[in-house]
Amino acid sequence: MGWLDQILIVPIVLPLVTGAVLLLFDERRHVLKAMINVASTLALTVVALVLLHLADTPPADANAATTGVYLLGNWAAPFGIVLVLDRLSALMLMLTSVLASAALVFSLARWHRSGPHFHTLFQLLLMGLNGAFLTGDLFNLFVFFEVLLAASYGLVLYGSGALRVKAGLHYIVINLAGASLFLIGVSLIYGVTGTLNMADLAVRIPEVAENDRMLLQAGAAVLGVAFLIKAGMWPLGFWLPNAYMAAAAPVAAIFAILSKVGIYVILRLSLLLFGADAGASSGFGGSWLLFGGMATIVFGAIGVLASQAMGRLAGFYLLVSSGTLLAAIGTESVTVTSGALYYMVSSTLAISAFFLLIELIERAQNPAANVLAVTMEAYGDDMDEDDIQEEVGVTIPATLAVLGSCFAGCALLLAGLPPLSGFIGKFAILSALFNPEGPGQGGSVAGTAWALVTVIILAGLSALIAMTRTGIRTFWAPIDETVPRVRLIEIAPVAFLLMLCLALTVQGGPAMRYMDATAQSLHSPAHYIRDVLAAPRVPGPGSGAQQ
Amino acid sequence: MELTLALAIGVLIGSGVWLLLRPRTFQVIIGLSLISYGVNLFIFSMGRLRVGAAPVLGSGGAVNPADYADPIPQALVLTAIVIGFATTALFLVVLLVSRGLTGSDHVDGREPN
């Protein structure tokens, strides 16, 4: 193995070093900085691919470790801090690096030059994200959370302007208050159980004394609120559409994964700490997630319908997607979870592509942006003479045709219509809700499942209505001379993300198999706990007797 | 001692929350600072209150854990102080930028009518 043992630390160290190195170069050398950033992000994608493969490789024999564990500082698990790689973290790492590559390539067209230190902030954000997905204890989760939040504070303000500063101010205050809740929750849990390691917590929680259990659950609830703020659950998510709409397009695209950090932690902790083996605390908070998630879907769907601006629409759709995931986690069923994981990947890719697309489309509606836009169109150079056409039929300029087809792809994905992956994700959730005992086994469908199915379908309908309305207003409106000037480097990331959704559709079988395995291991965390707590220390160079 | 500490945490967090809900950015930042002080004390108290006990083990000999204070909350508090300090400083910059751009210290960037 050798170097493969060390690869687990790469997703954290590589962005950290790159971010630090980028600080050494002057802002005027932006080409060099961009090159370094692109190289690092691509390397990260390759590492994420390797990790995904490692996490999905079945163990050689039944007793071998299925979870990758990296002991930082070489102390055994409950005492030292650990990085843990399982299927879920590998999936999240992959998603992060894919979104990062797309957003970064998009930003190279012009955004990366409109303010200082874009590349450094970008890399530090990646470090925080990767760390949060890999860490195996609660306090390092806090540290990486703060790293990614600090970088996101810089990025949400990126490009400046009064609107961004106002939205950024609210964003920062809410997240600072959320960080306090996070600390209160973590210290309450530590006060009761005396450990912060997630695997160790899972072992100790069933043994918590009756008197202390209320304190433990209060701590878990306070901690949960901190993550639900991040995930945007109603009524904690009012800040989200404003902040995401105000952020620059590539920033908003990478922020699509930020709300999924909250979802990831809730998914991991609720199943690890309060899963079926948790004794008296088992299933704690499940119904809160279910009903809160449904309320979020309804609120998001109304917001989607009410939005005039496309950025707002995307922000509210993000709430719908968060709500769907939270409610699916709240059902505490293995099959629903695996459908939800598929839905999460598909919807995150689609929303990210949509955020990028919005900026390209809105350029046409805002002549000031046209002045800013670096010219040199990739297509549509000679389309300016379209004015001569009369009632013979409207020639749509090539640029608009490309933008329009990307928009249609986004609309299908967001509304969850066939044939793209949005449909598969929703279908997997719905079919799991209707077959609680497994496919073809019958079993009664609970009332809450009916309610959830209804709101999910209605939310899809509202997304469809809103996207159709926006599309008609944007693409079928009379074309005046402001055809947006779009460079190939800007449309390529959008097309790349949509192509990934298409690939996810075509390769639906293997993808669903991976999600099933992920959901299975999340719901029976015994392997995870055993692997983390039994991870062997590396013998020292001299002898085995180092302290 | 428990009562004093509990009252101190309560007063700090109570005042902090009240200030956080005020409309001026300066009040908000003071509120956030007070909350973070309260939270730091709270983390500290979760390691159980001990007077005059060292958190670091001495070398050699058998160790009786009951003679020592819990070191982990103390380490956590240090980290939380550093992170809280950095984010508060960053918020201060944003606050000044907002004041400069809008000419108002209201959290919404404009005075209520």
Image (tube, coloured by chain):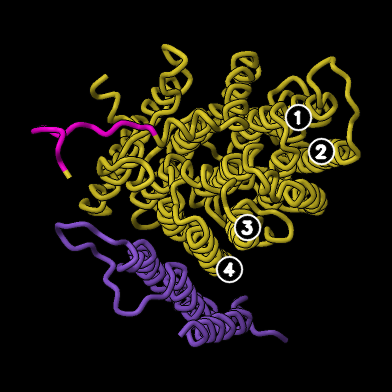
Q: Is residue A396 left or right of residue A380?
A: right
In depth, the one of B50 and A468 nearer the eye is B50
Quarter of the image with the N terminus of chain A in it? top left
* Residue at image mark 4: A170
- Name the N-terminal-most of marks 2 and 1: 1
The answer to the question of whether label 4 and label 3 lie on touching residues, with beta carbons closer than 8 A, is: no
Q: What's the chain of the residue with tag 1? A: A
Q: Secondary structure at mark 2?
A: helix
Q: Residues within 10 Å of mark 2 (few under 14, many from 20)?
A: many
Discs 2 and 4 carry the same chain letter: yes
- Name the N-terminal-most of marks 2 and 3: 3
Q: Tell me what hue chain A is rendered in.
A: yellow
Q: What's the chain of the residue with tag 2? A: A
- Specify the segment rendered in magenta: A534-546
* Residue at image mark 1: A429
Amino acid type for the residue under numbered disc 4: His
Task: From the top left corner, tell me how far across and down residue B58 is, in percent.
Answer: 18, 63
Residue A76, magenta (yes or no) = no
Q: Is residue A47 left or right of residue A237?
A: left
Residue at 31% across, 33% down: A39
Q: Secondary structure at mark 3?
A: helix
- Name the N-terminal-most of marks 4 and 3: 4
Discs 1 and 3 carry the same chain letter: yes
The answer to the question of whether label 2 and label 1 lie on touching residues, with beta carbons closer than 8 A, is: yes
In depth, the one of A354 and A205 nearer the eye is A205
* Residue at image mark 3: A213
Q: Tell me what hue chain B is rendered in.
A: purple
- Name the N-terminal-most of marks 2 and 4: 4
Q: Which mark is residue A456?
A: 2
